[in-house]
Amino acid sequence: MALTLVELRTKAAEVSGRYDLVDVDDDYSDDGMDFFIHSAQTFLDKRAITQRSTNVIYDEKATGTWYYDFTRCQKIEDVWINNAEGRNRLEKKTLNELKELYPGLISETDQGTPLYYTPLSVRSTEDTDMDNLGAFFNHTKDASDAYRSILMLPPPDEAIVVELTGIFYADVLTEETDTNFWTNNYPDLFLMAILYKLETFNRSDRAIKYWRDTLDAELIQIDMNMVSEEVHEVNQIEG
């Protein structure tokens, strides 16, 4: 049975006995439990690759735009661009390789169909002087902790649609009625992960080991199902 955020929070308080982390008099609103819920979700997202971990995001970019910012991505797997003529898969390069391929000023670099991309760190503690003596291909973003980015070159000479495939975190539970992949498909597993996270702060080594071993046993089954599905698809194609 799928659980909403408030239902998950309520159940976590009931099972753990941690009623100090909810406001019972206010329909079990959050009084600290959501911290452990979000921590548990991150644990599950990192621990298991599921049918819904892979996600594809699209974004239209204007002529000359050479970067793309996005959130909640654990791992970039593939990048394509679509334009009026067709589709083009971008070749992955390191940032240093792209700096060597495109060493000139942005204003002096010919635009064209993007051929390459690189994952880009957008964090900078001081970027005031970045373009003072010439604007080169790079990109930073204020308040960037939630963001990842890619740099694409050459800069497009027409509007393009970026198609990025990767491993993403599940949707964050914020509203009381919110659900996501874990609450819809594995609410019991989500609850176990919350109990595990609660124990890591209680520092009960025995309880921590119990919940970690229990979670790993359940997550292994999810991994085995994923492998079985992938192998079946390969056999079907080869046959």
Image (tube, rainbow, N blue to C red):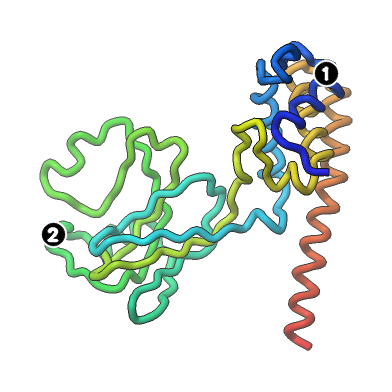
Label 2 close to label 1 by CB (< 8 Å): no
Q: Secondary structure under badge 1?
A: loop
Q: How many numbered discs sit on the rendered protein?
A: 2
Q: For label 2, count other residues whose C-alpha is less than 10 Å away and answer few (under 14), some (14-19) or many (20+).
A: few
Q: What residue is drawn where x is 81% and y is 53%?
A: 222
* Residue 59 image position (x, y, % from top left): 41, 59
* Residue 153 image position (x, y, % from top left): 30, 64
Disc number placed over residue 111 in the picture, else none: none
In the shown orientation, is residue 164 left or right of residue 125?
right
Q: For label 1, count other residues whose C-alpha is less than 10 Å away and answer few (under 14), some (14-19) or many (20+).
A: few
Where residue 114 sits, quadrant-wise, is bottom left
Q: What residue is drawn where x is 82% and y is 66%?
A: 228
Residue located beneath label 1 in the image: 204
Q: What residue is drawn where x is 66% and y is 25%?
A: 34
Q: Quadrant of the N terminus?
A: top right
In the shown orientation, is residue 23 left or right of residue 59?
right
Q: What residue is drawn where x is 79% and y is 68%?
A: 229
Q: Quadrant of the C terminus?
A: bottom right
Residue located beneath label 2 in the image: 107
Where residue 87 sits, quadrant-wise, is bottom left
User: Who is closer to the viewer here, 60 or 106?
Assistant: 60
Above or below 198: residue 157? below
Above or below 18: residue 131? below
Above or below 83: residue 75? above
Q: CA distance from mark 2 to mark 1?
A: 60 Å
Looking at the rendered structure, the kind of residue marked 2 is Ser
Q: Secondary structure under badge 2?
A: helix
Please report whichever mark, 2 or 1, sits nearer to the chain's N-terminal start: 2
* Residue 30 image position (x, y, % from top left): 66, 20
User: Who is closer to the viewer here, 203 or 141?
Assistant: 141
Looking at the rendered structure, the kind of residue marked 1 is Ser
Above or below 62: residue 13? above
